Image (cartoon, rainbow, N blue to C red):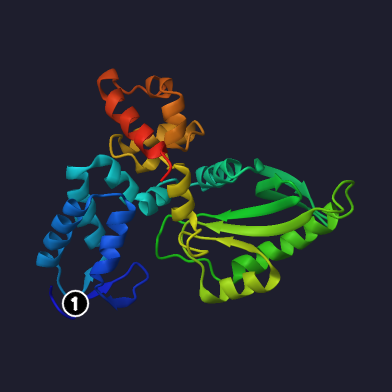
Amino acid sequence: MKNSINIVKYSGDIVPFNVDKLKDSLRRAQANEEIIQQIVAQIESVIYDGITTKKIYQMAFKMLKGKSRVSASKYKLKKALMELGPSGFPFEKLVGKLLAHEGFETKVGVIVQGNCVQHEVDVIAQKDNYHYMIECKYHSDQGRFCNVKIPLYIHSRFLDVEKHWEHQKGHEAKLHKGGVYTNTRFTTDAIQYGKCVGLLLTSWDYPMGNGLKDRIDKSGLHPLTALTTMTKSEKTKLLDKGIVLCKELHEKPTLLNQIGIDKTRHKKILEDSEALCKNN
């Protein structure tokens, strides 16, 4: 192993290369140990001071794809979330489906009456006495974080909606909460403010052990953009139809016909979709 190799993160921060982080991300993708050792050895032999995490990711992904398509799809989850754009609506649908999988009744993209004004809300989720108003902040650039202005703004909107909800019949015993979901990360201030006012905050890796990456892995609700067996334009056609999950392809294979994918390619796409649907 080369000593004191510094790498450049998406945020521009310079940190020492941590081989354990690379191994962990490959294990999360369920690559077997032999493949992990091969990839790590290859990367350690070529990295240099000042290499970007993006470059390291690209090398690891390419090697993994040659050995296991499904592991490569799991490995590219963060990038797959970035590829749900550009509108952000597919990300809202993904969040709605995650919450529905967790037992919530959900509505995506709804107009909600507040005490003062109407609000367009990304996801409304209800289960038992829980009633959530959730905003989704989607970024197509990993270096963009949610700063404190976002939870400040969402909280003020939530307070207006909550005031209206509290006067509705049947809401007396309900626990109302506002929330922010993002596919990147929150700044420290954003987390501090969100915790202080009681917002539900979910990002790529927050809360620890229950962020988007963990919940997607557990539920098997992988975005179809993770598939390595389809082109970008084919994925875009499906996203335009409102399809966001591998699970939806697995459940309705005729979608592939609808976007003009040749029959000879269906088997690989559907095999990978099915494998990604399995809960970890």
Please, is residue 119 above or below residue 103 in the view?
below
Look at the image and tell me in which quarter the N terminus lies. bottom left
User: Splitting the image into 4 quarters, where does residue 47 fall?
Assistant: bottom left
Q: Residue at x 30, y 61 (%)?
A: 24
Quarter assignment of residue 22:
bottom left
Question: Is residue 85 in view from this perspective?
Answer: no
171 displayed left or right of 102: right
Q: Which residue is mark 1?
A: 5
Residue found at the very far bottom of the displayed protein = 4
Which residue is found at the position 34% from the left and 54% from the top? 28
- Asked whether, in this view, residue 3 is left or right of residue 209, the answer is left
Q: How many marks?
A: 1
Q: Position of residue 241 (x, y in %)?
A: 49, 30
Q: Seen in the image, is 53 located left or right of residue 156?
A: left
Question: At label 1, which amino acid type do we have?
Answer: Ile
Secondary structure state at the residue bearing disc 1: loop
Q: Residue at x 51, y 34 (%)?
A: 242
Q: Position of residue 188 (x, y in %)?
A: 52, 75
Q: Which is nearer the eye, 105 or 118?
A: 105
Q: Residue at x 60, y 66 (%)?
A: 150
Q: Is residue 211 visible?
A: yes
Q: Please tell me how crowded label 1 is: few (under 14), some (14-19), or many (20+) other residues with Cα within 10 Å.
A: some
Q: Position of residue 197 (x, y in %)?
A: 70, 70
Q: Is residue 193 left or right of residue 51?
A: right
Query: Where 259 sits versus 154, above or below?
Result: above
